[in-house]
Image (cartoon, rainbow, N blue to C red):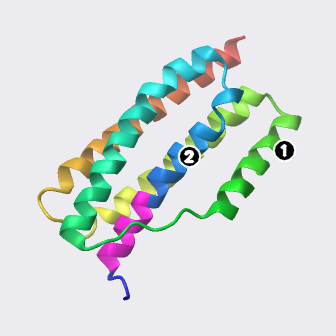
Amino acid sequence: MFLDNRQVAMDSALEALADSIDYFQDNLERLRPTLRDALEPHFEERGRLMRELQSLARRHLDLLPRDADVERDDYMWLWSRLKSFVGNDSQVLINELLEQERVLMQSLSTLLTHPLPDAIEPVIEECWRNCRSLIRELYRLQKLRQKR
């Protein structure tokens, strides 16, 4: 069955949410404890929002969950590790997380250009606020790292 544009936009947003959570979890051991402690609440909230959005998408948009793109995840993990060899590991991770947020915000923006059921819009808006909050935290952490 083909997806309509609204379903494609929702699928892209869900994929961006999952990618950002996966990237964070895959790199937990590389994060200093202070960074991990600062970022974990944002990603815990994101996981909750993603599960809620998946459920709503299933119920209101007849959108079934898709399998993760394992090769893409492996590539992103390897590429991040390679960049860490030539730069500050924490700085590389922060920059990668910021890029993940940009991708996620783009997908959420695209999703909001489609008519959505009333139950879904507040969750999308919460995802947007979570994204903005995480970006502020990442910039704060980036500035702290630069001062050292």
> Horizontal and vertical percent for residue 48?
33, 41
Location of residue 147 in the rendering, given as x and y in whole percent from the top left corner: 68, 12
- Amino acid on which the number 1 mark rests in the picture: Leu
* Residue receiving disc 2: 22
Q: Is residue 126 above or below residue 37?
A: below
Q: Residue at x 58, y 38 (%)?
A: 25
The answer to whether 52 is drawn above or below residue 148 in the figure is below
Kindly identify which numbered label has been placed on residue 143. none
Q: Residue at x 56, y 46 (%)?
A: 22
Tell me the SS state at disc 2: helix
Specify the principal SS of the magenta part: helix
Circle 1 is placed at which residue position? Answer: 82
Asked if residue 93 can be seen in this view, the reply is yes
**Left or right side of 40 for 49:** left
Please identify the quarter of the rendering in which residue 68 is found: bottom right
Q: Regarding mark 1 in the picture, which secondary structure is present there? A: helix
